[in-house]
Amino acid sequence: MDLRNTWDKWPDANGRFGEFGGRYVAETLMPLILDLEKEYRAAKLDPAFKAQMDDMWAHYVGRPSPLYFAERLTEHFGGAKIYFKRDELNHTGAHKINNCLGQVLLAMRMGKTRIIAETGAGQHGVATATICARFGLKCVVFMGETDVERQKPNVFRMRLLGAEIVPVSSGTGTLKDAMNEALRDWVTNVDDTFYCIGTAAGPHPYPEMVRDFQSIIGIEAREQILEREGRLPDAVMACIGGGSNAIGLFHPFINDEGVRLIGVEAAGHGIETGEHAAALNGGRPGILHGNRTYLLQTDDGQIVDAHSISAGLDYPGIGPEHAFLRDTGRAEYLSCTDNEALAAFQLCTQLEGIIPALEPAHAIARVGDVLETMDKDGLLIMNLCGRGDKDVFSVAKALGFEI
Amino acid sequence: MPTSRITARFDKVKAENRAALVAYLMAGDPDLETSFDSMCALRDNGADIIEIGAPFTDPMADGPSIQRAGLRALANHTKLIDVIGLVARFRETDHATPVILMGYANPVHSLGYTAFAEAAHAAGIDGTILVDLPPEEDAELRAEYAKHDLSVIRLATPTTHEARMAKVADGASGFVYFVAVNGVTGAGSADPESIAGNVEMVRRVSGLPVCVGFGVKNGAQAAEMAKIADGVVVGSAFVEHAQSAHESGDYSKAPWGMGALAGELSAAIAAVVKA
């Protein structure tokens, strides 16, 4: 099939990006996700919905986020110009709120009164709890027992915001188990509950819907770079866990085939060790959490726990659109180890005065390699999708400091 | 012919004016040998159809009992091919009791639909219930099943309205598994009266026998469900005997306990005379 200039046409009517995506859910949820799709289509066409989103983006989230020329990092590498899309400046400190806002407004439109969410590091949980507090909705956040223990500040934030935290002890007590438990809650509470998924994965229409809400990142970046430089960038780059910040940046450039799309997965202790979170570079296609996509799994199709120093990348799957972009070659996917991310975290902090989250530090770590493949007069945009305040404890521990 | 094993069993049950007892257990919990003994005990004590669970790390439709059963089976390194092997062994001496494999899509997808269908047929498996493979996503699997006369057993739930049921019925065979409550396995029980209309609708639209499950734990509940259903599915209550066996270290408690429960349930179901 000739895919040129039709990259933005996906998913198809069956919720598929090529052979990825779909709706792999229990029958109890099928009528719900079909209904959600219908409601989302209607909201998308409704000017009042868009106006409400725009208003909240401007006055509550703080959009547009700046496009910042990272001058000293550019000098450091001595290659193409590096720009940061500064989504870490959003309210709650990451890109997650772009999506939560959209989904919660949609839930309210559908008459739902109870919002559930899964969270790993707690960023999506905090963003969901924030929007729910703003609109006075009941919020229940599922979080693996292990994560509740290692992300105490975010757990407290969510509680302050009025959310109920449900520690999940089933399975291995991490993000994937929190997602299982959220799905179990949803099949039990089908009438009043809306499941606000935190990444561009899950059953159709979630990958499309989350991508659309996150595409504000790329839409703004495209306008901003045209204004600053008078031309499109040569490459755009982002870290990938489930892949929502990356697809949000990539998608508005997807038909611009001269723009390289580069994702960076978490290689943990190294892909060869088996302890990583690089589903595309170290996994194979399978079915989990409602979609067919690349997964970390055993020969027998059992899901393997992911590992990354960054809790936000610590998931054994990846959004189905990334699986499609990888297999078709439209996007490139690199990886970065825990140690490389730690070094990049410090480099960015020291040279730019910006403490990045450990997630985008993975992308920063590969910037040097990408620049080597680009001309000196090239332009690169990297999504600085979250700020690092939440990570100072784990970084201090990894570097051997006591605070 | 595998499908006819299911059909023949429902014909027999109907001739006896009663509902069928469908018993679920997890393969490899607490070990495969015990699962084999348990299957025999279930059959010998009145289970008409056996659902054999294939473990999965992420059972998002299951409650705590079956989640733990799956983790115990996985801790014993029970693989999908072992589950298939267990049925093959059961089939060496039992040619009549339908055996349905129940689980999640990924292990089957991982083995490959073609290879799985061939192996399942060779082992004497009659059909599968794959919880996260709705009608929208099982065309590829169905094409393979058609070559081997394996049944695709579909789930219907209280959220399945009549218009949707036509989609669920299309391509379904064997029977339809009606999930009585919105929730996970082992959760609260349904009031048979409140779902009688749904069960009737499912039977009418699908033209297949309807087995009702989720939340049925004892003879009294099974008898109530038998009044409205063609079959009654019991899972978590059986699985809890495997848990006791595991905890006590005396694995013989599993077939003994499951057999005793099957006896109680089948007697209670048989006491309900169907028109």
Image: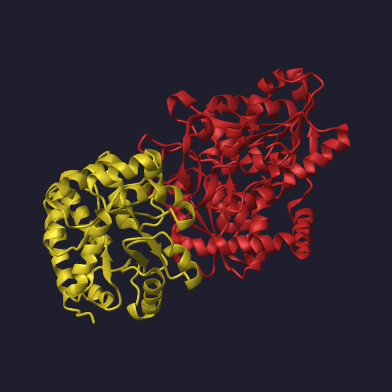
Chain colours: A red, B yellow
Please state the horizontal and vertical placement of residue B71, each as a whole percent of the image.
Answer: 31, 46
- In the depicted view, which residue is nearer to us: A212 or A267? A212
**Residue B117 in which image quadrant:** top left
Q: Is residue A195 above or below residue A21?
A: below
Spot occupied by residue A149 in the image (x, y as percentages of width and height) = 46, 45
For residue A281, above or below residue A151: above
Which quadrant of the rendered structure holds the C terminus of chain A?
top right
Q: Is residue A343 left or right of residue A46?
A: left
Residue at 70% across / 62% down in the picture? A43
Q: Nearer the viewer, residue B39 or B18?
A: B18
Q: Is residue B65 visible?
A: yes
Give the quadrant of residue A246: top right
Residue A368 shown left or right of residue A71 in the figure: left
Residue in the picture at 45% in, 36% down:
A296
Rendering coords of residue A51 (x, y %): 79, 61
For the point 54% across and 43% down, the residue is A20
- Compared with A109, A1 (above or below) is above
Count the labels in the image. Answer: 0
The residue at the point 19 percent across, 63 percent down is B48
In front here: A327 or A179?
A: A327
Give the quarter of the figure containing the N terminus of chain A.
top right
Compared across the picture, whether A57 is left or right of B247 comes to right
Q: Is residue A386 visible?
A: no
Whole-percent x, y for residue A382 in the image: 71, 33
